[in-house]
Image (cartoon, rainbow, N blue to C red):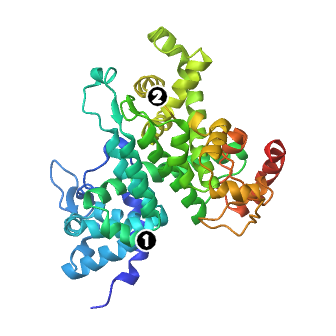
Amino acid sequence: MRNPLPKLGRFFARLRKQTAAKPTPDTVPPALIPAPAPVSVLVPNAPVNTAVETTIVRVAPTAALEALPAELRCQVLAHLSELGLADLTALVRASPVFYQQYLLDRKALLGRGLKTTLGNVLVDAYAVQTSGSLYELHLDYQEAWESPHQVQPETIKLLMDEYVALRSATPVALLEDSCTEEDLVGMAAFYRCLAQPLSVKCATLFLEKLDTSLGVGNLSGTESTRLLRALYRYQFYCNLFGEGRRGHRNVVDFNWQEQLAAFFCVFRPWGIEEIHCIYILLRNTYDHVFETIRCDFDRDDPGSWDLEDNYVLGMVREGTASRGLKPFYKILTTNDHQLLVERMKKYLALPGVFIETTLDGVTQHLRRELRPMEGDRLEARGARLPFSGDAEDAPPLAWVIAWRATYSNTYGKSLPDSLKEWGYVFWDNKRLIKSKGVDVVLGEREIFS
């Protein structure tokens, strides 16, 4: 029998389009991929019944593949998992036979699919998965106001120590030594239902701020990686220090300087900017939403949230953003005004110690005095940092231009929000040059560089 694998590429491309469905965070399947339903087709030449003009029969679109021996079906699934989650999902969603086969080796298949799809972002996905348990609040909603769930600093430090250690490990070692099957199911669901659709949406929103005449087009591999890891790291940060799913959680004994040193300083400065760009996008989106629903709040809940007060507005905006990506995605995909009002009432929160003060200039100055780092020394001696091409770990062209090809360990609110609004650190040099991005960076750098 000939090996069928080389001829499957175009088939699965078509199958992926046919089975694609818009994922939503409310429908995360417990096994990543729900059991598929049979497909109804019309048979034109079927006998005509007096009551029914055509006969409907149930056939599987993947019948030829399902007829393969079990050993070859295993090879097909293994081959698709090496291509990534999209192809694996397309087949398993379409075929009950392959769905059952997939369940027999789910951990290995999901591991390979995630490794191919996420690459080096796999460790960030694992960090989001493991830290997500901090959201759990074992109190009813009313009690939560008086007894918020407190996360101990020792827990935060353990999670960050593990994260830093795993960043130096290979994806294979992470999958074999750390990830359980349950972890992989959760990681795959988070990618399909939040991270992947949000990365596309965020790219569109960022680039619209730079130049409305330019479409997103196809993101390069480097651009996709930068956006994905920023989303995952922002969610990881929210898991550690945000307000949680119910908006009532805090981390005890963690001030702004400690938070900056414990979390943000494990990344390069342009990596910190990636995370801050995501926050700025959430913040500005919520600003727009608040403007839209302000009258509804005044009419329905007088005095509960004084969104006319700029101080209160700023606090609520930051607290709501600290609840992470799921509320943000739900708001982005809500078109009905009344539903938008109801959802925002549910998501509004006041922040604890969060990103606005953690990344301001004063906190950075205190961190430099109390906990000097190698990046500070590189900046002090004016170390050169030329553009070396678009690579995952290399500084993007916009960052190099902004700091005149010298090392800088300055980030956050020390740089203008007007750069963050279009996600300046996400884009490859070709996109930056083709758009007006280079000119924008050159103009803005006169303010801070």
**The label number, if any, that marks residue 170 in the structure image:** 1
Please give left or right for residue 187 compared with residue 265 in the image.
left
Q: Residues within 10 Å of mark 2 (few under 14, many from 20)?
A: few
Please give left or right for residue 108 compared with residue 438 in the image.
left
One can see residue 167 in this view: yes
Displayed quadrant of residue 390: bottom right
Residue drawn at the location 35% of the way across and 77% of the way down: 79
Q: Residues within 10 Å of mark 1 (few under 14, many from 20)?
A: few
Displayed quadrant of residue 217: bottom right
Compared to residue 144, the image places residue 158 above or below, namely below
Which of 56/44 is in front?
Answer: 56
One can see residue 220 in this view: no
Residue positioned most to the front = 370
Local secondary structure at mark 1: loop
Please give left or right for residue 51 compared with residue 114 in the image.
left
Displayed quadrant of residue 140: top left
Residue drawn at the location 53% of the way across and 31% of the way down: 318
Q: Horizontal and vertical percent for residue 200?
A: 54, 51
* Label 1 vs 2, first from the N-terminus: 1
Residue drawn at the location 37% of the way across and 48% of the way down: 131
Q: Which residue is mark 2?
A: 336
